[in-house]
Amino acid sequence: MTAETAPITLLIVDDHAIVRAGLRALFGHVPGIAVIGEADGVASAVAEAARLQPAVVLIDMRLPDGSGIDACREILAARPGTRVLFLTSYDDQEAMLAAVFSGAHGFLLKEIGEDALVLAVKSVAAGRSILDPAAARAVRERLQSMSHVERPATEVGALSAQELRVLALVAQGNTNKEIAAALDLSDKTVKNYLSHIFQKLRIGRRSQAAAIFSRNSSR
């Protein structure tokens, strides 16, 4: 099978066996998507993502040994190219924002229809972000509120206006290439901005940058 026809590999993470079975059955009938593994908690999700290297991780927010947010951050820290899509019944707005700021590429409620879920997985795998409208609106409001603060007295106070824009896009889960396109910059310039941001914030990972952005944008 060539790279052009290779299926989207999917890891399902949910603590309920019946939910995992239902999702596996659903995607088992979808051409172009292959469920390659399951996990029922944070630790197993991180381990299976590292072992199987799926293109997309479909994950619940609440897990027995922690939060899906923690799993998302660890998975993306190890493999930034992985796409993470939350599928949960937890519709609190702060949870949606936390998912976005953790680097997730989508947030959906379990009441979503089967066709819409399949389309969401394909869209996320193709590089697009899928957000509940309420989450998208809340994120925009947070970003707008930050853009009006010239010198915030927070952890990000030492960052320039352009560095704040880059940091905000990192927190949304954008790749360097996506950030470059959004801000009309070269990939190399984006890398330089990230290097300066990491130095100023004294961090070494994108997941840490997203966490700092989330913490400061809520103030």
Image (cartoon, rainbow, N blue to C red):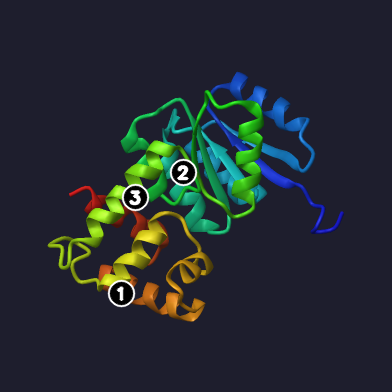
Q: In what element is the residue under mark 3? A: helix
Q: Is residue 211 above or below residue 25?
A: below
- Which is nearer the N-term, disc 3 or disc 1? 3
Is residue 10 visible in this depiction of the protein? Answer: yes
- Asked whether the beta carbons under mark 3 and mark 2 sit within 8 Å of each other, the answer is no
What's the CA distance linking mark 2 and mark 1? 25 Å
Q: Which circle marks residue 122 in the picture?
A: none
What's the CA distance linking mark 3 and mark 1? 27 Å
Residue 194 figure quarter: bottom left
Q: Which circle marks residue 140 in the picture?
A: 3
Q: Is residue 218 above or below residue 87?
A: below
**Circle 1 residue:** 199
Which residue is nearer to you in this view: 90 or 59?
90
Q: Is residue 154 above or below residue 20?
A: below
Tell me where residue 28 appears, x and y as whole percent.
76, 31
Q: In what element is the residue under mark 2? A: helix
Is residue 48 visible in this depiction of the protein? Answer: no
**Crowd around label 2: few <14 · some 14–19 · many ≥20 (10 Å):** many
**Residue drawn at x 40%, y 44% as measured from the top left:** 136
Tell me where residue 92 appears, x and y as whole percent.
34, 30
What's the CA distance linking mark 3 and mark 2? 25 Å
- Which is nearer the N-term, disc 2 or disc 1? 2
**Circle 2 residue:** 71
Amino acid type of disc 1? Gln
